[in-house]
Image: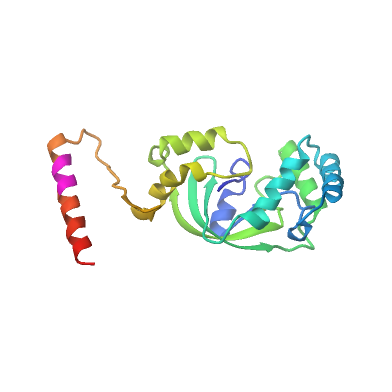
Amino acid sequence: WMIRTNDGLFYDEFINEGFIAIGWNCVRKHTFPIDKKQRELLEKNIKEKYNTNIPGMAINKCEKFCNILKDGDIAVISGKSSIAFAIIGEFYEENLETLTEEYELKFNEEIKQKKFLETIKCPYCKRRKITLISVLNNREEINPYLYKALLLNKHSLSSLDQYADTILSSCYDIYFWKGTLSLAFRVQKKTNVGALSLTEFINSFATLLQVEDENL
């Protein structure tokens, strides 16, 4: 799952304090399940208070965050210049007396006016714990296909299932996914890798894997 951080504003807080969050504080976990009439009323409320023409999309994202994301899923957290990968944990609602709908709307207004951004902490009450896997700070370390997907995707929360292999290879040097064992080798060499050296390396590693497999 890709999680945005309000143009990087909450990135450090998410990483340092071990959580991710999503907005629209007027929508809570107990909002769901929701019937047609309740949804229409909620859409009207969101449209008026949050000044959006797509309130239904906001509700869908909140429902996914509360009920569709699972413990053990991987979050791809995008900052201004870094990307973090983390294991998603349990859902919780934080500090409900302070992180109110009114507080969030006040925050949104301050964002528009570019006020006090250095002192603002995440105002969203719907949260999930995370366990950090790795962080890529260098643009060159990020897989170009994944980077393009993140660059073009402007949603606060969205599925990245189609990039599962790419994400797993960015998180782990070795992983087993859908019946396939995959290994990632981080080539740091600036010059070309010789064809003979590459062939010998692949053959040696394939032989090692075969020996290990026979010993299982």
Task: Using the rendered image of the protein, determine whether residue 115 is visible from the camera's viewpoint.
Answer: no
Task: Using the rendered image of the protein, determine whether residue 15 is visible from the camera's viewpoint.
Answer: yes
How was this image coloured?
A: rainbow
Q: Residue 215 appears at what percent x and percent y?
A: 19, 66
Give the quarter of the image for residue 210: bottom left
Q: Residue 150 appears at what percent x and percent y?
A: 53, 38
Q: Left or right: where does residue 29 sit relative to residue 71? A: right
Give the quarter of the image for residue 109: top right
Vertically, is 50 above or below 73?
A: above
Residue toward you, 62 or 86: 62
Q: Main secondary structure of the magenta part?
A: helix
Q: Measuring 42% from the left and 35% from the top, which residue is drawn there? A: 144
Residue toward you, 8 or 174: 174
Q: Residue 198 appears at what percent x and percent y?
A: 17, 40
Vertically, is 50 above or below 68?
A: above
Tell me where the magenta segment starts and ends, as one range.
198-203
Q: Left or right: where does residue 106 sit relative to residue 156? A: right
Vertically, is 191 above or below 17?
A: above
* Magenta stretch: includes residue 52: no
Which quadrant, please, contains the C terminus? bottom left
Q: Measuring 56% from the left and 51% from the top, which residue is drawn there? A: 12
Q: Left or right: where does residue 173 sit relative to residue 101? A: left
Q: Residue 30 appears at what percent x and percent y?
A: 77, 61
Q: Measuring 54% from the left and 48% from the top, which residue is drawn there? A: 77
Residue toward you, 7 or 27: 27
Residue at the bottom extreme, as displayed: 216
